[in-house]
């Protein structure tokens, strides 16, 4: 019963992280269009926009932040391979467990600060200091959501690593791997 609940939790987190990661990837062509449009307006029409820089900054922030959990899901974050690859799998599990606890501690702080900044942004109507001056409250919501999503992914990874450490077996199969050529493109 407990094993089934853990599997269900981990699979649910993987599904959510995968869905959000694949969804946010669709913002990349939007980002490319916004940048290309700004270049066209600035250098061909000699009429730069007041909004394109801010929009591209926000889109890039959304992609980078919300894509962090997706990268963790597929083990795409960097690792200290000099030590990590030369120890047995159970020691690797311990390294991972320690790093997950530290990461969740840091992300909990980021989450708390982001919620506070969101409340401040609403209360004081914070705006980006630019000619267009868009509101900033949505950005703090995104930081809170991204940190929460990454905490969920780390908790799923923690459960799987702890299960492997104690039983020597995998709790669930690894998510479908990303094609390296697809990442490079």
Image (tube, helix red, strand yellow):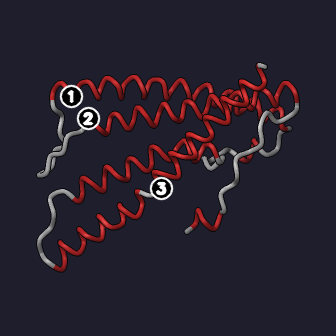
Q: Which of marks 3 and 1 is nearer the N terminus?
A: 3
Q: Name the residue under label 2.
A: 137
Residue at 58% x, 66% y: name it.
184
Is residue 59 rendered to the left or right of residue 14? left
Q: Give the spatial CA distance, label 3 vs label 2.
A: 22 Å
Whole-angstrom CA distance, mark 3 to mark 1, is: 28 Å
State the image coordinates of residue 46 (x, y, percent, origin top left). 12, 75
Total labels drawn: 3
Q: Residue visible at 65% across and 57% down? A: 178
Q: Which of marks 3 and 2 is nearer the N terminus?
A: 3
Give the position of the N terminus as an image quadrant. Answer: top right
Q: Quadrant of residue 3?
A: top right
Q: Quadrant of residue 55?
A: bottom left
What x and y, as percent, mark residue 25? Answer: 47, 56
Q: In this view, does 184 lie above or below 113?
A: below
Quarter of the image where one finds residue 26: bottom left
**Residue with the most extreme right position:** 168
Query: The residue tagged with tag 3: helix, strand or loop?
Result: helix
Which disc, if any, is residue 122? 1
Q: Which of 32 and 24 is in front in this view?
A: 24
Q: Which residue is drawn at 31% across and 23% down?
A: 116
Residue ID at (29%, 27%): 117
- Whether tag 1 and tag 2 are in contact, CB under 8 A, the answer is yes
Q: Which mark is residue 25?
A: 3
Q: What element carries label 2?
A: helix
Q: Going by the picture, which residue comes out furthest to the top?
A: 2
Image vertical order of residue 45 relative to residue 64, above or below: below
Instruction: Check contact, mark 3 vs mark 2: CB within 8 A.
Output: no
């Amino acid at each position: 019963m407990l094993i089934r609940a853990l599997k269900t939790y981990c699979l649910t987190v993987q599904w959510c992280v995968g869905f959000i990661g694949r969804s946010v990837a669709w913002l990349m062509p939007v980002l490319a269009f916004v940048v290309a449009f700004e270049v066209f307006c600035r250098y061909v029409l000699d009429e730069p926009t007041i909004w394109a820089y801010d929009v591209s900054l926000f889109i890039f922030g959304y992609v980078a932040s919300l894509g962090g959990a997706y990268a963790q899901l597929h083990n795409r974050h960097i690792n200290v391979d000099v030590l990590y690859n030369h120890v047995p799998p159970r020691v690797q599990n311990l390294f991972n467990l320690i790093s997950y606890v530290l990461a969740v501690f840091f992300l909990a702080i980021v989450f708390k600060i982001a919620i506070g900044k969101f409340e401040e942004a609403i209360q004081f109507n914070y705006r980006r200091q630019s000619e267009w001056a868009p509101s900033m409250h949505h950005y703090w919501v995104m930081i809170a959501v991204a940190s929460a999503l990454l905490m969920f992914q780390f908790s799923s990874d923690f459960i799987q690593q702890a299960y492997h450490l104690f039983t020597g077996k995998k709790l669930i199969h690894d998510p479908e791997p990303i094609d390296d050529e697809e990442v490079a493109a």
